[in-house]
Amino acid sequence: MPQNWTFIRQRLTPYLFLFPALFLLFLTVFWPTFQAFYLSFTQYDLTNPPQWVGLANFRRLWRDSLFWKTLWNTVLYLVAVVPILVVAPLGLAILVNRKSRGITWFRAFYYTPVIISMVVAGIAWKWLYAENGLLNQFLSAIGFKDGIPWLTSPKWALYSVMAVTVWKGLGYYMVIYLAGLQSIPAELYEAAAIDGSDGIGKHWDITVPLMKPYLLLVAVISAISATKVFEEVYIMTEGGPRNSSKTIVYYLYEQAFKSLEISYACTIGLVLFLLILGLSILNLKLSQARGQIH
């Protein structure tokens, strides 16, 4: 009996240490997730108790043209922003991964947007994008008299918001790549130089293959962030004009907190969850496939 009790105590002790964190995780993540999943099959608007309606919210979602519009905007955001945030920060990281005078200030310059609040950044860029803002004044100075309706034209609004996302994320992903670059032994580059691989060639032959885990990490993080973009849209355009910059998360916010359509918002959230889960699984499969190839 004492031996059995000792064995049980050894087994239970780690879980006792984990229990406080798991309990908080259950209260803040798992239970709200379960509630949202349940509410997506009900009719609930904060004034009445939830009533079971089955798949009615999903049928409504299927017929909702605005939902498909926001989904398309989100996919477009994903396709346009992620490749830039995967490739451009790597170039910046290679640029700042040098021992030269003033390189610390150069790194700080590119990292500064990361530590700026999105609220502050959004307001600042909204001023820059204004009709008489700095960007249009510059365009007028070089001959474009009318300027560009950055945030007031359906053709430009979404791409203007994308530019802020890219500007804000460059420094963050640059630091991730910089950590990877500094783990590559300098002897590999010296050996490559002896073999005739120098300049851009050495990065193609050595840097890119060795940085693939970091490239995959940045691809996953930036893709998930792009599908959940909200602050930029809320601050700069509020989804306009004519829903041209409205993303799926902003549409979820509108349904939940403006229209008080809690159940319908939970249904949209479930679709968003499945979209993010699909992206994560796809990236995991791609990484496993690359590992098998190599």
Image (cartoon, rainbow, N blue to C red):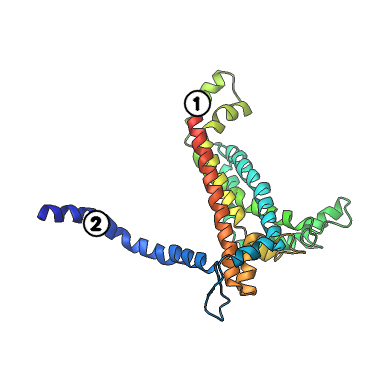
x and y percentages locating residue 40 in the rendered image: 55, 66
**Front position in the image: 161 or 175:** 161
Q: Give whichever of discs 1 and 2 has the lower sequence position.
A: 2
Mark 2 residue crowding within 10 angstroms, few (<14) / some (14–19) / many (20+): few
Figure quadrant of the N terminus: bottom left
Residue 181 in sight here: no
Give me the residue at 54% from left, 38% from top.
286
Residue 55 in sight here: yes
Asked if disc 1 and disc 2 are in contact, CB closer than 8 Å, the reply is: no
Identity of the residue furthest to the left in this view: 1
**Front position in the image: 145 or 240:** 240
Give me the residue at 81% from left, 54% from top.
138
In the rendered structure, find residue 91 and report the number of the disc placed on it: none
x and y percentages locating residue 244 in the rendered image: 75, 60
Query: In what element is the residue under mark 1?
Result: helix
Task: Please tell me whether residue 74 is drawn above or below residue 243 in the rendered image.
Answer: above
Q: Which residue is mark 1?
A: 188
Mark 1 residue crowding within 10 angstroms, few (<14) / some (14–19) / many (20+): few
Task: Please tell me whether residue 94 is drawn above or below residue 161 in the rendered image.
Answer: above
Identity of the residue furthest to the bottom in this view: 47
Query: In what element is the residue under mark 2?
Result: helix
Give me the residue at 60% from left, 45% from top.
106
x and y percentages locating residue 14 in the rendered image: 27, 55
In the rendered structure, find residue 12 and report the number of the disc placed on it: 2
The amino acid pointed to by label 2 is Leu
x and y percentages locating residue 91 in the rendered image: 62, 39
The amino acid pointed to by label 1 is Leu
Task: Please tell me whether residue 102 is drawn above or below residue 253 in the rendered image.
Answer: above
Specify the quadrant of the image occupied by residue 95. top right
Q: CA distance from mark 1 to mark 2?
A: 48 Å
